[in-house]
Image (tube, rainbow, N blue to C red):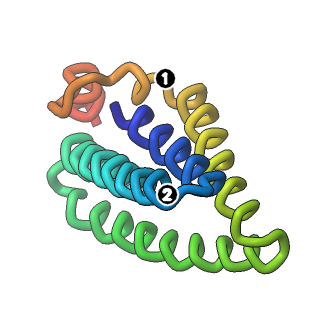
Amino acid sequence: IMFGSVAGFGIATLVFALSTQLWLSLLALAALGGFDMVSMVIRGALVQLDTPDDMRGRVNAVNAIFINTSNQLGEFESGMLAAWFGAVPAAAIGGIGTLVVVGVWMALFPHLRKRQKLENDPQHEATRNKA
């Protein structure tokens, strides 16, 4: 579900970038927000579930720094691409980039790809309890 949500975000970004109709652009933006919200909730839950209790505060602090920093860096990157190539190509590049990252992450992290439930993973729990 997480990778599907992020892929949906990328597809909605492409639709928005290439749309010439107001209604389709608004629909794409609504889908963007929905897909982003779902993926954020899933990622937040996975961080909570897969982090050992004694490390949860530190991991959440680092996670918050990366999330806030990524927003600023993303705005900078989008602005630079728009200045170099124009707004439509910049948005399209963003959608394509999102889909590429989803594909790479699905290949690199098959455990996340196969995970279907937001509950403690018994396999991960056994590994975590040994440490």
Q: CA distance from mark 2 to mark 1?
A: 33 Å
Residue that sits furthest to the right in the current view: 84
Q: Quadrant of the C terminus?
A: top left
Q: Which mark is residue 25?
A: 2
| Element class at badge 1 | helix
Residue drawn at the location 78% of the way across and 80% of the way down:
83
Q: Quadrant of the N terminus?
A: top left
Where residue 6 appears, x then y in whole percent? 45, 43
Give the residue type at disc 2.
Answer: Ser
Front-most of residues 43 and 100: 100
Q: Is residue 11 above or below residue 107?
A: below
Residue drawn at the location 17% of the way across and 56% of the way down:
54
What is the quadrant of residue 17 in the picture? bottom right
113 sits to left or right of 51 = right
Closer to the N terminus: mark 2 or mark 1? 2
105 sits to left or right of 56 = right
Mark 2 vs mark 1, foreground winner is 2
What is the quadrant of residue 126 in the picture? top left
Q: Which mark is residue 44?
A: none
Mark 2, other Cα within 10 Å: few <14 / some 14–19 / many ≥20: some
Give the residue type at disc 1.
Answer: Pro
Residue drawn at the location 44% of the way across and 34% of the way down:
3
Residue where numbered disc 1 is placed: 110
